[in-house]
Image: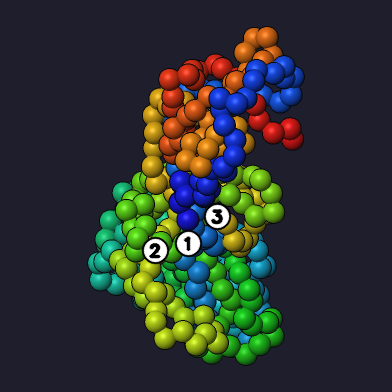
Amino acid sequence: MLAIGALTLSACSGTNADAEAPQSFDGATATITKGDLVGETTVQGTLHYADSYTLKSAFEGVVTALPTPGTTLTQGSHVYTVAGNNTYLLHGATPAWRAFEEGMSDGEDVTQLETALSELGYFEATPNAHFDWNTIAAIKKWQKALTLTQSGSLPLGTVLFAPEDLRIGALKARVGDNATMETELFTASSSRQIISANLKLSDQALGVVGNSVTVRLPGSATTTTGTITSVEPPREKDSEEGSKETTKERIIPITVTPDDTSALEGLQEASVSLGLTSQTRTGVLSVPLGALVALSTDQFGVEVVDEKGEIRRVPVTVGLFAGDRVEVSGDEIAEGQRVVVPNR
């Protein structure tokens, strides 16, 4: 819902500015300020870890080691062990699909392996697509550091490539289970947190990659910021389980990446509110919402307090509503004037 429409303007009848005589006032006041106002549309989103998936065993046999849920594995980390076969994490976008060994054909997967070993400090040449003695030497150095047999080759399943560090989710298997190539071991995801939300078609103009978003966290008044990093094509919203609705709503999924991850500390998954900028007014006068008073059925005003503590009601034209402030204009108001606000 647009913040601009968050307050329904309905001036109350029976109050006339001309009938009000000046009176002394020493209650709560606020200052008329000049600056920029930003109107927002609020949508609900879900904070979660990106790119979640389920990892299956690359080997057959008894599971003897699994990672700890909630931990983050960095490049070079041990991931799991099945039947004495260890799997290690390396950074790379392409999954491992063959063994790395002498005599193998050139390929981008070789470049990816050499790049990862270079980042770990084991590959000393320039990474390329050819598996040669430089690659063998790097693998042996890595195997020595891991106290493994220095074979200079890596059987398929020894390396798990992932674009970035992995966060371990829920375990699907237990140590002692007999695994096959189809056995699900655990869920994993990126260590990055993102926010997924859906825009109505009527709000699609607000979904622009690169736009800043206000993120309101649950259970407190804490806010942080994020950036829209992806906008998907319109699609039908998935029906909720048990729903009898036959008409499906069209939505536009968006992804927001938080700017400051420290603000999300302690939150693994949560419902959050997103404030998307819908309208901006620059260099305008504004007052707190509570400063508005009804002068007639179709006229609003504010109560201006002068230096002597006397108040007078002056008419204003109301503009953009933004959060707890509202744009006002009029011949009898100016920046810096004090206006009456309700006592807190």
Q: Distance between the residues labelled 2 and 1?
A: 14 Å
Q: Could you tell me residue 96's position as x and y percent?
A: 39, 72
Q: Could you tell me residue 83's position as x and y percent?
A: 60, 83
Is residue 147 shown left or right of residue 212?
right
Nearest the eye: 158 or 266: 266
Residue matched to label 1: 196
Q: For marks 1 and 3, give the one nearer the viewer.
A: 3
Q: Which residue is drawn at 63% across and 73% down?
A: 170
Please say if the residues under marks 3 and 2 sit with CB atoms less than 8 Å apart.
no
Q: Which mark is residue 273?
A: 3
Please say if the residues under marks 1 and 3 sit with CB atoms less than 8 Å apart.
no
Which quadrant is home to the C terminus? top right
Q: For marks 3 and 2, give the one nearer the viewer.
A: 2
Q: How is the image coloured?
A: rainbow
Q: Of all residues shown, which one is farthest toward the top?
A: 308
Q: Is mark 3 on a helix, strand or loop?
A: strand
Q: Is mark 2 on a helix, strand or loop?
A: strand
Q: Could you tell me residue 181's position as x and y percent?
A: 49, 87
Q: Residues within 10 Å of mark 3 (few under 14, many from 20)?
A: many
Residue 58 drawn above or below residue 111: below
Q: How far apart are marks 3 and 2 (CA)?
A: 15 Å
Q: What element carries label 1?
A: strand
Image-quadrant location for residue 311: top right
Q: Which residue is drawn at 68% across and 9% down?
A: 308
Q: Could you tell me residue 190's position as x and y percent?
A: 50, 61
Tell me which label, 1 or 3, sits earlier in the chain.
Answer: 1
Q: Which residue is drawn at 42% across and 69% down?
A: 153
Residue matched to label 2: 200
Residue 167 drawn above or below residue 24: below
Tell me which label, 3 or 2, sits earlier in the chain.
Answer: 2
Q: Which amino acid does label 3 sit on?
A: Ser
Q: Can residue 138 be seen in this view?
A: no
